[in-house]
Amino acid sequence: MKKNIIIFDTTLRDGEQSPGVSLNMEEKLQIGRALEKMGVDVIEAGFPVASPGDFEGVKRLSDELQGLQVAALARANKKDIDTAWEAIKGGANPRIHTFIATSDIHLRAKLRKSRDEVLEIAREAVKYASQYTSNIEFSAEDASRSDLDYLCKVFEAVIDAGATTVNFPDTVGYAIPWDFARMIKYVMENTPNIDKAVLSVHCHNDLGLATANVLAAVSSGARQVECTINGIGERAGNTAMEEVVMAIKTRRDLLPYEVSINTRHITSTSRLVSQLTGMPVQPNKAIVGANAFAHESGIHQDGVLKDRQTYEIMNPEDVGLDSGQLVLGKHSGRHAIKSKLEELGYELKPEEIDKVFNSFKALCDKKKEVFPEDLAAIVAEEVWRIPDKFSLSYLHVAGGSGIRPTATVAIEIDGEEHATAQMGAGPIDAAFRAVASLTKTKSKLLRFQVSSITGGTDALGDVSVRLEENGLVVTGQGADPDIITASVKAYLNALNRLERMKANPKLTKERATL
């Protein structure tokens, strides 16, 4: 009999702690709805005590998403636990997730407490949380660097106090798969009451081993996996949900487990998270990268044409990709667009379909071929983007050999159009100077990255930028067949994120790590 693996998604908590990421309420709800549609078992909606904005975000997600469990993170103290419960109490079987560190380095350098003191704090926190709910998770921060015998005592104590899930985090991505498997097995065999709780794992990717560590842990008895879409998160990120789910689906011979995820929504959810967080997916990223199902080698192409299984271990359709060309053009109607959107996993309102359709028609005048990836980019640009303070009205760039590049830019600022022209070292530099002049911003460009959404010289260009201003760091994305236009869209997207952050100084959050 196959065992069920609980998928605990922390995109909206640990994922949002990625440098430069700050989601507003509507963006969090869009991601939450997508995760619910995927069939995720539990989502960690945030850290309610961190800020008023985080509290409201967790509360709305908990109140509105009744098809899954919503968890709220809380340190092992009464204030955090009270605040967490207030945020999630309207949810369906809400979960309080409390934590404290158990490694000697954390006890000595951060907490400055003894092992006995921390054990008692953990026990009392879980006992206190049990007055609100029986759905309690306890995490031992930095478990992979903790003394295992001590960790087993802590787990035994919190399970006796009411914890129904105990989490073993590899907080700093220190573990190696075979050793991580040993640790999980040791906990399973040396925690007397472990049969009364689910053992969970939460792995970071500092050594690039998060997914491997999780699969090793599952094979040794872990039954909950904590992960994020696209593997986003602190530092090098977290275990990528799509990698774990597709590994289980693809290698059932070695991983005889079941997950609740509808894998056909993986690609659309990945793109949604990438667009709303401003964090692009690297082309060679497993499962959801642009090159994940691409073949350039002649030998590979020949094999795939004869039998896809020669060089593909997964069907693109299983993760929500259309393996064929999108045969739509300027003569296609709304019904065809609506049908293709549904095929790709998008459920849009009539007015949203109209926006996509109009942009699709405009794109057909610029490109010979239109692909599913292009349609996904249109959805991201026209449907998912939140109304902005700054929006591009007009862009004209002049440049070339022997000419000083000049950009003329018109921007709507709060509905009123403003225009200027600036020169620069190159056309994009000139355009960015014009935007900065109009918006009167003094942000510093930390990163500029360009990639192609599809193949061909007429492909949509996808641009990602990272900006910093007075300690605030944000990312922005833009897509367009014209790479300079895509760059300006990305720059404006980042500036709009900065404006939202500056307008809400109270929303600066306290960060929590597991």
Image (cartoon, rainbow, N blue to C red):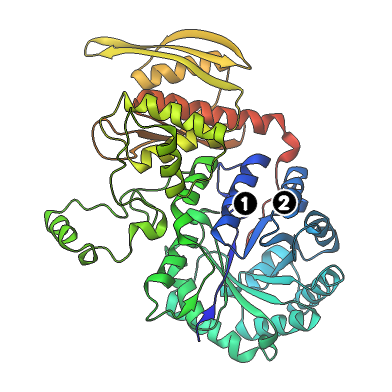
- Whether residue 249 is visible, yes or no, is yes
User: Which residue is denoted by mark 1 in the rendering?
Assistant: 32
User: Which residue is denoted by mark 2 in the rendering?
Assistant: 64
Q: Residue at x 27, y 63 (%)?
A: 312
Asked if disc 1 and disc 2 are in contact, CB closer than 8 Å, the reply is yes
Q: Residue at x 23, y 36 (%)?
A: 456
How far across and how far down the image is residue 322, in percent?
34, 50
How far is disc 1 from disc 2 in space, using C-alphas?
Answer: 9 Å
Where 459 sits versus 251, above or below?
above
Quadrant for residue 360, please give it. top left
Quadrant for residue 101, please give it. bottom right
Where 393 sits versus 60, above or below?
above
Q: Nearer the viewer, residue 179 or 464?
A: 464
Total marks shown come to 2
Give the left or right position of residue 23, taking residue 117 as reference: left
Q: Nearer the viewer, residue 68 or 169?
A: 68
How far across and how far down the image is residue 51, in percent?
75, 46
Give the left or right position of residue 246, taking residue 273 as reference: left
Rate crowding at label 1 as few (under 14), some (14 to 19) or many (20 or more) other CA atoms within 10 Å: many
Give the left or right position of residue 298, taking residue 189 as reference: left
How far across and how far down the image is residue 24, in percent?
65, 39
Q: Mark 1 vs mark 2: give the one in front.
A: 2
